Image (cartoon, rainbow, N blue to C red):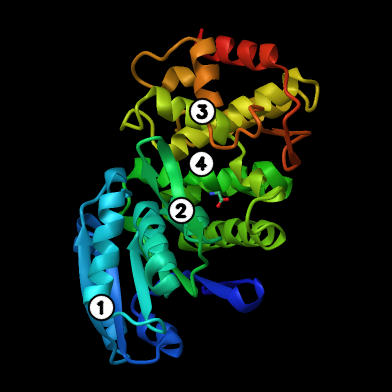
Amino acid sequence: MRETVHVPLGDRAYDVLIGPGLLAEAGALVSPLLPRPRVAVVTETRVAALHLAALQDGLGQAGIDTVVLELPPGEATKSWAHLGQVTEWLLEQKVERRDVVVALGGGVIGDLVGFACAIMRRGVRFVQVPTSLLAQVDSSVGGKTGINTGQGKNLAGAFHQPSLVLADTDVLASLSERDFLAGYGEVMKYGLLGDAAFFGWLETNAPAMAAGDMGLRVAAVRRSVEMKAEIVTRDETEQGDRALLNLGHTFCHALEAATGYSDRLLHGEGVAIGCGLAFELSARLGLCSQEDPSRVRAHLKAMGMKTDVSDIPGDLPDASAMLDLMGQDKKVIAGTLNFVLARGIGDAFVTSDVPRDVVLSVLGDALA
Ligand code: GLY
């Protein structure tokens, strides 16, 4: 049940391995990259308690020694302070240019450690070992790294591709149902943006996948990674098509900002609601049929996920304040909001040509 997706980026090409039992085999898989049998592992305390011993055992099987830095869990770790801490620690550990750093954790650890590796000694190699569904299908692949700044999320960073990604689908069993389903928001996004057959497959199979079916989990992660790899290969630095991966994200970022990036709304939950709103906006603009947003929402409901803005607990600002929050999105170019809209399920495109009043009416109805 092992799948490999190759990301063909020339001298920065790498494999994403997907399947159960990869932590146990990490030594054999990482060894070919190493100039000496030693890696520095950066993780966070919650993940370390669950998975660090298994990773160290796996590496130890190939005689690989580890030094480990454990950071606090949570989004606040993606900061200048922790970037400095990780970089200084790697230097203290005498990690050299040809050595390999391992990022064990979810998106926060992958983004932070990837950024530290991008700047340390002007670039050291790193291996992503993503432990959340969101990190396995999105953030560990494609080389976006970075931290949050006082001005907003992911505003300092670099493109730095990993040398290998080990997506061990066994670790998904340790996620809470809420975290798993939030990650699923990104899986569904791939079907909606570019593969109608995959979305149909998810409508049939995602409930069993969420309930734990390993074959279905491997298949869903593989197709997601394959689609991400294909888009990233076309447009590594997001000059165009890579923005398709932001389907649902313009609405999501406004919802996340309005809820203070708190537990009220997880990123993947915001993406899922945002995908529904992007399809609603597309339908109102006459780009797709009204059945499409209904189908997206029906699937979210069937999965027991947050579907509508009204599913977010607590108060939200009004439509025009939400539109202002969308204007803070870093995808604003020359003051114009870029949206990912759709001509139908599996057929998304990027545009800046969206009348403000139609966005306002979608937001107004969603908030009513
Ligand atoms: N998460 C969106 C991207 O990697 O471009």
Of the image marks 3 and 4, the number of the one nearer the N terminus: 4
Name the residue tied to disc 3: 328
Q: Is mark 1 within 8 Å of ligand 1?
A: no
Furthest residue to the top?
Answer: 368
Q: Amino acid at mark 4?
A: Gly
Q: What separation in Å lies between label 1 and label 3 (alpha carbons)?
A: 42 Å
Residue 260 x, y percent position in the rendering: 34, 27
Name the residue tied to disc 2: 157
Name the residue tied to disc 1: 56
Location of residue 341 by image quarter: top right
- Between 210 and 178, the one lying in front of the other is 178
Residue 177 x, y percent position in the rendering: 35, 43
| Tag nearer the camera, 2 or 4 | 2
Q: Which mark is residue 185?
A: 4
| Tag nearer the camera, 3 or 4 | 3
Q: What separation in Å lies between label 3 and label 2 (alpha carbons)?
A: 18 Å
Q: Amino acid at mark 3?
A: Gln
Mark 1 residue crowding within 10 angstroms, few (<14) / some (14–19) / many (20+): many
